[in-house]
C-alpha cells in the first residue's frame, strides 16, 4: 500500500517527519508521500532518516498547495518535486510570510472577541516555519475556548465566522504551473469535497495531471465516477489518507486510503515519460 497524502509538523500534522517514517514502517506501508501544506520542509529530514536508518520504504517528495477558485477552496497535490528553487521557492517564501500575517490578523480578531490567545502560543504549537488555522484552532482548544478543532473552525475561524480572514490570492492554475516548473506532476486533492463539482472539469482543463480518487471521505459512488473521469481524460489516479494524526486509530489513520504497487508504477511511468 502507498499512502500519497501525509502531513507532518512541517505544516499542520502532529508527528515529525522522522516519526511519520517510523509509523509507516509499523503500518506495513510499501511507500508514502509527504505532502505538507505549502512547504517542502519535511522532505529532507524524512529522506535523511530513511538513508541513515537504511529503511526500505519508497519515498515520494510531495507538497499540497492550498488555492482558491471562486468560493471553493481547492488543494493541489504535487509529486516528485525535483527542484524547489526558482519560482517554487520564491512563491513558498511569499506564502510563508502571508500565512504569518493572516494568523496575526485572526488572533487580533479573536482578541477583539474577548479571547486571551497570543501569537506566541500559536507559534509554539506550530513548531516549524509555517503557521495555519489548525494551529490557532489547537490553541483555542488548549485554552478551553473550543471543544475541538472542528468546533473552533465552526464557531470562530472558518469562512463566514467572526474571526475569519481571507487568504492570500493563489489559483489552481498557478499551483499547477509551479509544480510543473519544479519537475513534478499535479493532482487534484479530494475532488469529491469540492462544493461546486462542475469546477473539477474546469481544473482538468487547466492542465491538472491526476485526480486523488481514493480518499477516506469519498463514497464508493464518487470513487467510481472519479475513476471514469480520470480514465476519460487520461489522468493518473492517486489516493491517500490525508493523515495528520498520531497512529492507527479510526478515520485519521496512516494508510487508511491509498493505492497499490501497480498503480504507483503507472504514476511513475507517467512522470518519467512526461517530465
Image: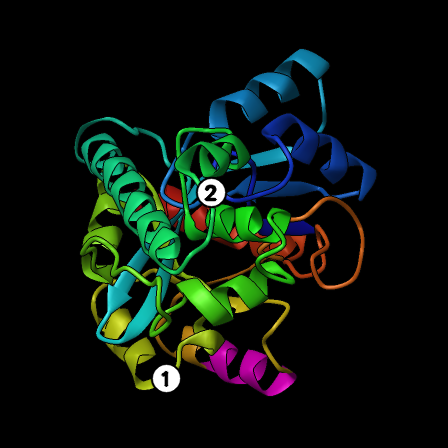
Question: Label 1 near label 2: C-beta < 8 Å?
Answer: no
- Which residue appears at 57% of the width and 57% of the height? 145
* Magenta stretch holds residue 13: no
In the shown orientation, is residue 114 left or right of residue 175?
right
Q: Which class describes the residues within 10 Å of circle 2: few (<14), some (14-19), or many (20+)?
A: many
Q: Residues within 10 Å of mark 1 (few under 14, many from 20)?
A: few
Name which residue lies at 28% across and 71% down: 204
The residue that mark 1 highlights is 197
Question: Which of the labelled discs sits on residue 36, or is there none?
Answer: 2
Image x and y of residue 263, in percent: 58, 57
Q: Quadrant of residue 181?
A: top left
Task: Check the image and report above or below for 188 versus 102.
Answer: below
Of the two numbered discs 2 and 1 on the same chain, state the one appearing first in sequence: 2
Magenta segment range?
A: 220-228
Q: Nearer the viewer, residue 138 or 81?
A: 138
Q: How many marks?
A: 2
Q: Is residue 225 magenta?
A: yes
Amino acid at each position: 500500500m502507498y499512502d500519497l497524502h501525509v502531513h507532518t509538523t512541517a505544516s499542520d500534522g502532529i508527528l515529525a517527519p522522522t516519526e511519520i517514517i517510523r509509523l509507516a514502517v509499523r503500518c506495513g506501508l510499501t511507500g508514502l508521500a509527504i505532502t505538507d501544506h505549502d512547504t517542502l520542509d519535511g522532505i529532507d529530514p524524512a529522506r535523511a532518516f530513511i538513508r541513515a536508518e537504511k529503511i526500505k520504504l519508497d519515498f515520494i517528495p510531495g507538497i499540497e498547495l492550498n488555492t482558491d477558485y471562486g468560493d471553493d477552496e481547492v488543494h493541489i497535490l504535487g509529486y516528485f518535486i525535483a527542484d524547489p528553487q526558482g519560482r517554487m521557492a520564491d512563491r513558498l517564501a511569499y506564502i510563508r510570510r502571508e500565512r504569518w500575517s493572516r494568523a496575526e490578523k485572526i488572533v487580533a480578531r479573536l482578541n477583539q472577541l474577548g479571547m486571551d490567545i497570543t501569537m506566541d502560543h500559536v507559534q509554539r504549537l506550530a513548531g516549524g516555519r509555517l503557521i495555519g488555522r489548525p494551529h490557532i484552532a489547537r490553541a483555542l482548544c488548549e485554552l478551553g475556548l473550543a471543544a475541538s478543532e472542528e468546533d473552533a473552525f465552526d464557531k470562530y475561524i472558518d469562512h463566514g465566522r467572526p474571526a475569519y480572514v481571507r487568504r492570500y490570492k493563489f489559483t489552481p492554475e498557478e499551483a499547477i504551473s509551479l509544480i510543473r516548473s519544479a519537475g513534478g506532476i499535479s493532482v487534484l486533492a479530494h475532488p469529491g469535497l469540492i462544493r461546486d463539482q462542475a469546477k473539477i472539469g474546469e481544473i482538468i482543463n487547466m492542465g491538472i495531471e491526476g485526480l486523488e480518487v481514493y480518499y477516506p471521505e469519498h463514497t464508493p459512488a464518487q470513487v467510481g465516477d472519479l475513476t471514469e473521469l480520470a480514465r476519460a481524460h487520461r489522468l493518473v489516479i492517486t489516493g491517500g489518507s490525508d493523515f495528520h494524526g498520531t497512529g492507527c486509530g479510526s478515520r485519521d489513520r496512516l494508510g487508511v486510503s491509498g493505492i497499490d504497487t501497480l498503480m504507483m508504477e503507472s504514476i511513475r511511468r507517467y512522470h518519467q515519460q512526461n517530465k
